[in-house]
Image: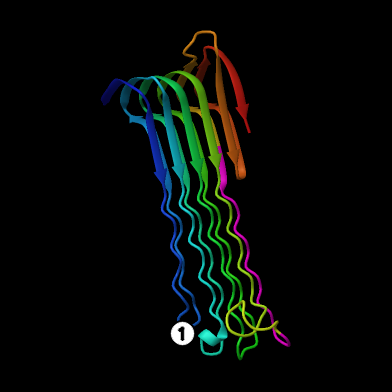
């Protein structure tokens, strides 16, 4: 039950998830250490729960979130490094997710004036799988590691849940870009020390390649409203508001306006883009 008001130049929030670490080298049982996933990034520029907010800004409201990259796999050691038998390459790990909210209201009321409202989310890249170790007395090349999946990205320029938001703004933009999947490691095809050493494997079994990771999901919403009322107008009456949402990734979706059980009132001319 808070009340927040004021006149400001701008508001920005940025969050960057940490990158995953590479797993340890092979142990005596032929298992490489498990790498770690990237951590999530979550950014909220203006956020309220059971709150009344009244802010006037001369410039922008900006939120940017980036997921951490997934850790790369560990190289599979060759036979010379592990008592005559190599080991599989380690798997890459998943990239961190990213969630960005320019304005996020839950059970609240907000009256906001700003030059622009921008939300950007970028999922972390999946880690690379590493190559399998060269064969030894077993005469079998070891498998390459799988690539990690990319992190998901979700961007909301304005998010209203059981709330009322009045926005006076010239531009509203939401952009979500999912993290790309990590490349697969290659199965060993050479004999000798290490994957790149020695000659091509003869009268033996090459290792199988790993599987590449897939890109994450991306969702972008210029205005997202559920059980709410959102009013949007330009700072200069009769001028055109630019309202856009762009999403790039697997199973991506982008909506300039997404509303359920809500009223979205556009009081001026609107130039809408989504894709």
Residue drawn at (58%, 17%), measured in percent from left and top? 270
**Residue carrying label 1:** 28
Residue closest to the far bottom: 137
Instruction: Using the image, determine if residue 247 lies above or below residue 165.
Output: below
Residue 47: x and y, percent? 36, 31
Residue closest to the far left: 2
- Is residue 28 part of the magenta span, yes or no? no
Left or right: 168, with 137 as reference point: left
Q: 106 and 236: which one is in front?
A: 236
Q: Secondary structure at mark 1?
A: loop
Residue 45: x and y, percent? 38, 32
Magenta-highlighted residues: 202-219
- Is residue 203 part of the magenta span, yes or no? yes
Q: Residues within 10 Å of mark 1 (few under 14, many from 20)?
A: few
Classify residue 249 by image quadrant: top right
Residue 262: x and y, percent? 49, 22
Classify residue 268 by image quadrant: top right
- Dominant SS of magenta comes to loop
Classify residue 115 by image quadrant: top left
Residue drawn at (60%, 23%), measured in percent from left and top? 272
Residue 149: x and y, percent? 56, 56
Q: 164 and 217: which one is in front?
A: 217
């Amino acid at each position: 039950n808070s009340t927040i008001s004021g006149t400001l130049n701008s508001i920005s929030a940025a969050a960057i998830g940490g990158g995953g670490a590479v797993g340890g080298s092979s142990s005596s049982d032929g298992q490489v250490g498990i790498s770690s996933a990237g951590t999530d990034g979550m950014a909220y520029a203006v956020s309220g729960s059971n709150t009344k907010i009244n802010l006037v800004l001369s410039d922008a409201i900006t939120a940017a979130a980036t997921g951490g990259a997934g850790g790369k796999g560990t190289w599979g050691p060759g036979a010379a490094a592990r008592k005559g038998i190599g080991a599989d390459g380690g798997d890459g790990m998943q990239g961190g997710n990213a969630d960005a909210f320019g304005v996020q209201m839950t059970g609240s009321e907000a009256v906001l004036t700003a030059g622009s409202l921008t939300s950007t989310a970028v999922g972390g890249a999946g880690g690379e799988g590493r190559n399998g170790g060269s064969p030894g007395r077993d005469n079998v090349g070891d498998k390459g590691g799988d690539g990690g999946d990319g992190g998901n990205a979700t961007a909301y320029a304005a998010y209203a849940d059981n709330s009322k938001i009045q926005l006076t703004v010239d531009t509203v933009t939401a952009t979500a870009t999912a993290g790309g999947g990590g490349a697969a490691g290659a199965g060993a095809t050479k004999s000798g020390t290490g994957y790149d050493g020695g000659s091509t494997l003869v009268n033996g079994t090459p290792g199988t390649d790993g599987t590449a990771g897939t890109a994450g999901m991306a969702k972008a919403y210029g205005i997202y409203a559920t059980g709410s009322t959102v009013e949007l107008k330009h700072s200069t009456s009769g001028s055109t508001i630019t309202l856009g949402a762009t999403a790039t990734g697997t199973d991506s979706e982008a909506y300039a306006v997404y509303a359920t059980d809500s009223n979205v009132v556009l009081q001026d001319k609107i130039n809408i883009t989504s894709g």
